[in-house]
Image: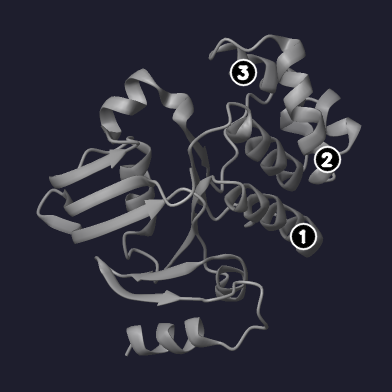
Amino acid sequence: MKNTPIVTMENTTRSFGARAVLSGVTLTVSAGEMIGIVGPNGGGKSTLLLLMAGLLRPTSGRVTVCGVDAFALSLTSAGSVGLVTARPGLYPLLTGRENLHHFGGLFGLSPAEVDAKAEPLARTLELTAAGFETRAGQLSTGMQQKLSLIRALLLSPKLLLLDEPTANLDPLASRALYAEVRTRADAGLACVLVTHDLSAAEAVCDRVLLVNGGIKRELTFSDHRAPLTGPTLKAWQELLR
């Protein structure tokens, strides 16, 4: 149901040794909401995403997904969270279809069920037949990234985490990916997008958070489809002063 809290972070800190990468993060992401995370390199954006994914434990504070501790959820119900990073993470010697069958099979999906879910997404993302039948290691990075997004959506997750998902995509492919994710958010999926593309963040997200060791500023857009006016860039400039 839309507006239901999916991610809750309460005064969350993550340190590596003596260095605090994130401090005092308090945040809620609800179903049907798409949140953009922008900030300088080393500001903690990817760490924030990994905490939500349950792949890192907070040094202090709490992170829950669907009311369950995020780290515990990653061990028991990993299919609740879809994660797409700039590195697709596919098995290079398997074809695109074999990769999807493998990952879907880990969660009990039959090859036929995987195909039924994957093929409409492939059409939307303009992934060619070669993307399914060619070994992943021989595909372009852009085609691998499309497969990575399809893999993340196979189990209809409650939360989709995207870390620079269009880093290796051409403009048209990037637009198709963002359009699909926005459609999913409008249907009730909670999405968090880490990106350096400020225009994209402003165009498709409901809120954009500027992160640099913590949440420094939040920008809210009343209509994410409105023409770009540049508030994210202005806030970015202020952040770096």
Q: Which residue occupies the extreme right position in the image?
A: 129
Quadrant of image for the C terminus: bottom left
Is residue 104 among the parts visible in the rendering? yes
- Please name which of the two marks, 1 or 2, marks the residue nearer to the observer: 2
Query: At which x and y percent is residue 4?
Result: 40, 46
User: Are the two marked residues, 3 and 2, in contact with CB atoms closer than 8 angstroms?
Assistant: no
Q: Which of the labelled discs sits on residue 170, or is there none?
A: 1
Along the viewing direction, whichever of 149 and 157 lies nearer the viewer: 157
Do tag 1 and tag 2 residues touch (Cβ < 8 Å)?
no
Q: Earlier in the sequence, mark 1 or mark 2?
A: 2
**153 left or right of 38 in image:** right
As shown in the figure, which amino acid type bears the numbered disc 2? Leu
Color style of the picture: one colour
Q: Which residue is mark 2?
A: 127
Identify the residue at image location x=58%, y=31%: 156
User: SS at mark 2?
Assistant: loop
**What's the amino acid at mark 3?**
Gly
Mark 1: few/some/many CA within 10 Å (<14, 14-19, 20+)? few
Q: Position of residue 164 (x, y in %)?
A: 55, 56
**Residue 143 occupies quadrant:** top right
Q: Which residue is mark 3?
A: 104
Confirm whether residue 93 shows in the render.
Answer: no
Depth check, mark 3 against mark 1: the one in front is: 3
- The kind of residue tagged 1 is Asp
Which residue is more in the foreground, 36 or 132?
36
